Amino acid sequence: MLCLSSLFLASQWTKKLITLGTVALGLVLQSSVRSEGFSPFGFPGDSASSINSQNVHDPTVIQFRGRYFCFSTSGAGFAIVRSSDDLKSWKTLGPVLPDTPEWLQKRYQHRALWAPDVFVQGDRLRMYYCTSNFGTNESVIGMAECANFDPDRPLEGWKDTGLVIESVKGRDFYNAIDPKVIADGDRQWMFFGSYFAGIHLVELDPRSGKLKNPSDPKPQCVARNTDERGNPLEGASVCKRGSHFYLFVSYGLAAQGIRSTYRIMVGRAESVVGPYVDREGRSMVEGGHENVLKSSFPMIGPGGSDVFLDSSGRWLMPYHFYDARHYWQGGLWGMPTLQIRELLWSEDGWPLPGMPIEALTQPQHSAPKGIAGVWVHQADFAEPKRIELHADGTLTDGQVTGKWEKSGQRLTLRWPRTDAPGQYWVDELLLSYADGYYVGRNQQGMVIRGLRIEGDSK
């Protein structure tokens, strides 16, 4: 979400992360940008964006009759809608409703409506939204509905249906913001929450879209951040793939521009109600998670994500990031920007961050086929480096020589261990993008990425 709650809970140490003046920093960042729009210091493609994708927070994207629609936090008003035919260019259409409903104006001193989630039920669209009295868990999730959504007139036919769930300071332990609705057979569920007691789950009535048990909803906790002060996690998104449900959440702080620490984590479960666990079986309620996406300069603080399967069979993950190359507001660098990234899946069924759709459409990122050659390689979203995979099955990183092998779409890199001669650190990777891109994890669970940039030098 836009995370106004993040602002008041942000600890003082975050203010010390950036020691350069914002104006001087902005000049440095701008001077480092290549003509094609990518930073020479970051992983290729991470800062790619489509036309009219700036000033977007907390996107949810649907595909309806071949057209894409993005609903996002407005900053002011009632959720902004954009449309696109190809995910390369967006057209801003306006707010879902022209005015904030009267019941909401009377009860909440809101600055904006946050984190809309759109649930498609045939031709019917239900948009769940939230707002809060700033700095508290006095929060509310409401719903607006369009009974017959017309993609040619996407702002017509919407009606607000009022309150779904509310959290009251001193009464409730949870925070009723950041809704995400998913169907499991003929039952529907809503995930929500931020800070306070973490992410929670309640069941909905499919006919009304409201709580199944409004007098006693009994929210169930499904995820908490146990390692950071204030339990900063929010922005749940859920999908089902195969026999598993996947719960994506955003850890850290948002709305801080380049100071933002948002990053996307995931756990999975065999049932929609959980328990959601990491690869080691640790529950997300106890802080378990797997990394999906972190900051990779100039892509800062990726989060507020959504996940959906488009008509071509691609899993896509929309989210916002703070573009360190561009000024935002209030002395902050880091323009909030929409990005949509392909999700790939490891052999053991865990999501991996593919290339952004916006980067895949640009010709400078087309890669020749084959494995041997020079690659940009990155571990755990740290500074990328150049490595070379040779045709004889060896790899080199400066003075270090390792091994690589390919089996189908699986690529294995073996790095010699200085602490255990004759043994190796192993990266298990998935090849994609015309054999020009790989992504996977190492033995420590870190995300490993690579992009082929040159053919074999030998």
Image (cartoon, grey):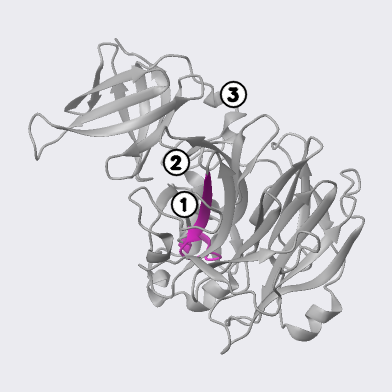
Which residue is drawn at the image coordinates 82% and 37% (left, top)? 65
Whether residue 183 is visible: yes
- Whether pointer 3 and pointer 1 mark residues with C-beta atoms closer than 8 Å, the reply is no
| Residue kind at label 2, given as amino acid type | Trp
Mark with earlier residue (3, 1): 1
Amino acid type, mark 3: Pro
Does the magenta segment cover residue 430? Answer: no
Residue at x-position 59% and y-position 24%: 363
In the rendered view of the protein, which quadrant contains the N terminus?
Answer: bottom right
Q: Which residue is mark 2?
A: 350
Asked whether the beta carbons under mark 2 and mark 1 sit within 8 Å of each other, the answer is yes
Is residue 229 left or right of 152 when viewed as pictured? Answer: left
Residue highlighted by disc 1: 266
From the viewer's perspective, is the residue at label 2 or at label 3 nearer?
A: 2
- Three-letter amino acid code at the position of disc 1: Val
Query: Depth-wise, is mark 3 or mark 1 nearer the camera?
Result: 1
Magenta-drawn segment: 244-260
| Sooner in the amino-acid sequence: mark 2 or mark 3 | 2
- Residue 102: quadrant of the picture: bottom right
Q: Is residue 420 above or below residue 102?
A: above
Q: Nearer the viewer, residue 39 or 437?
A: 437
Tag 2: Cα neighbours inside 10 Å, few (<14), some, or many (≥20)?
many
Which residue lies under the disc numbered 3? 363
Q: Quadrant of residue 431?
A: top left
Q: Quick check: 171 above or below 293?
A: below
